[in-house]
Image (cartoon, helix red, strand yellow):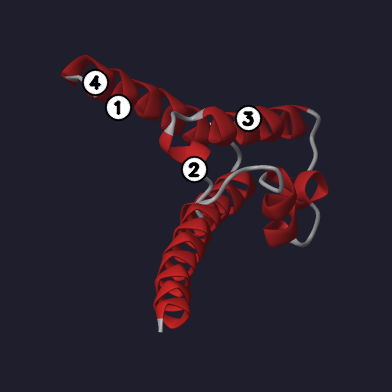
Amino acid sequence: MSIQDIIKGKKEWRAHMVRVKALPQDYQIVYKEIQKYLFKVGPVELTEGTGLLSGIVDLFEEGASMGKGVLEVTGNDVAAFCDDLIKDSKTYADVYQKSVDREVNKVMKKVTDKTEQN
């Protein structure tokens, strides 16, 4: 990653946050909770720019322009809304799970090989 990439990323993030701050208060509150949730759940694509989060802001801007409350857009179960957004995304939990499986398989193969040699 170059300095230009970092600068570009920071500019994109600032522009993204300007859009968030222009949303009605209820949308901003729910957006911040969604952002926290997604950062904890860890879809890998969140580290690749603002794509997913920008899509949420697009949806929120559209809902606000139609005069809808934020929960009319997301539904009352905001976590389920988030889970649905990332259901086909690779998460850091997925990456870690594969890593654990690989390590266990490697160790088990060594144990099996030793047992067969005796």
Which mark identifies residue 7? 4
Measure the alpha-carbon separation of dots 1 and 3.
18 Å
- State which tag comes first along the sequence, 2 or 3: 2
Callout 4, which amino acid? Ile
The crowding category of the residue bearing disc 3, from other C-alpha atoms within 10 Å (few below 14, some 14 to 19, many at least 20), is few
Q: Which of 118 and 97 is in front in this view?
A: 118
Q: Which of 98 and 59 is in front in this view?
A: 98
Q: In which quarter of the image is residue 56?
A: top right
Measure the alpha-carbon separation of dots 4 and 2.
21 Å
Measure the alpha-carbon separation of dots 4 and 3.
22 Å
Q: Which of marks 2 and 1 is in front?
A: 2
Q: Nearer the viewer, residue 83 or 16?
A: 83
Q: Where is residue 23 in the image (x, y as percent from the top left)?
A: 58, 35
Residue under label 2: 44
Callout 1, which amino acid? Lys
Q: Position of residue 70 (x, y in %)?
A: 72, 47
Measure the alpha-carbon separation of dots 2 and 3.
16 Å
Relative to 90, is 109 above or below?
below
The crowding category of the residue bearing disc 2, from other C-alpha atoms within 10 Å (few below 14, some 14 to 19, many at least 20), is some
Callout 2, which amino acid? Val
Q: Residue at x 76, y 48 (%)?
A: 74
Residue under label 1: 10
- State which tag comes first along the sequence, 4 or 3: 4
Q: Position of residue 112 (x, y in %)?
A: 48, 76
The crowding category of the residue bearing disc 4, from other C-alpha atoms within 10 Å (few below 14, some 14 to 19, many at least 20), is few
Q: Which residue is drawn at 79% across and 60% down?
A: 76
Residue under label 3: 55
Callout 3, which amino acid? Gly
- State which tag comes first along the sequence, 2 or 1: 1
Left or right of residue 47, residue 33 in this image = right
